[in-house]
Image (spheres, rainbow, N blue to C red):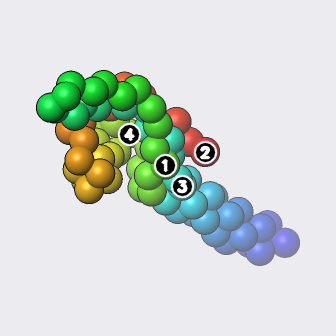
Amino acid sequence: MKHCITPLALAAALSLLASAALADCTAVYKAKQDNPLRLEHSSLTVAGPCTVAAAEDKVKAQLAARGWTLLKVLSVSEN
């Protein structure tokens, strides 16, 4: 019986780790637009690892598509 439980527990742990690594995150950021100067402090939902470094490129790309320049990702949190 012990031999059946070990692979099941391992599979469950691996699936939890994989889903956590792919979870959506909320990134809080500061951004700006020029002419006239406009500042924004808001948040975006991004996919991938919940780290500032991982979210930075995704937030920058989403903001650039709307004509904004990312100043800083302040924090990230899992949804």
Residue at the disc numbered 2: 79
The answer to which of marks 3 and 1 sits earlier in the sequence is 3
Question: Camera-side residue: 68 or 71?
Answer: 68
Q: Crowding near pointer 1: few (<14 within 10 Å), some, many (20+)?
A: some
The answer to which of marks 4 and 1 sits earlier in the sequence is 1
Taking 51 as reference, is 45 left or right?
right
Total marks in image: 4
Give me the C-alpha separation between circle 1 and circle 2. Answer: 8 Å
* Residues tagged 4 and 2 counted as in contact (Cβ below 8 A): no
Give above or below for 77 relative to 3. Answer: above
> Residue 45 bears which disc, if any?
1
Q: Amino acid at mark 4?
A: Thr
Taking 29 as reference, is 35 left or right?
left
Q: Amino acid at mark 1?
A: Thr
Give above or below for 33 relative to 18. Answer: above
Label 3: element kind: loop
Residue at the disc numbered 4: 51
The answer to which of marks 4 and 2 sits earlier in the sequence is 4
Taking 61 as reference, is 12 left or right?
right
Which residue is at 61% across, 45% downward?
79
Q: Nearer the viewer, mark 4 or mark 1?
A: 1
Taking 68 as reference, is 11 left or right?
right
* Residues tagged 1 and 2 counted as in contact (Cβ below 8 A): yes
* Residues tagged 3 and 2 counted as in contact (Cβ below 8 A): yes
* Residues tagged 4 and 3 counted as in contact (Cβ below 8 A): no
Q: Amino acid at mark 3?
A: Ala
The answer to which of marks 1 and 2 sits earlier in the sequence is 1
Residue at the disc numbered 3: 23
Label 2: element kind: loop
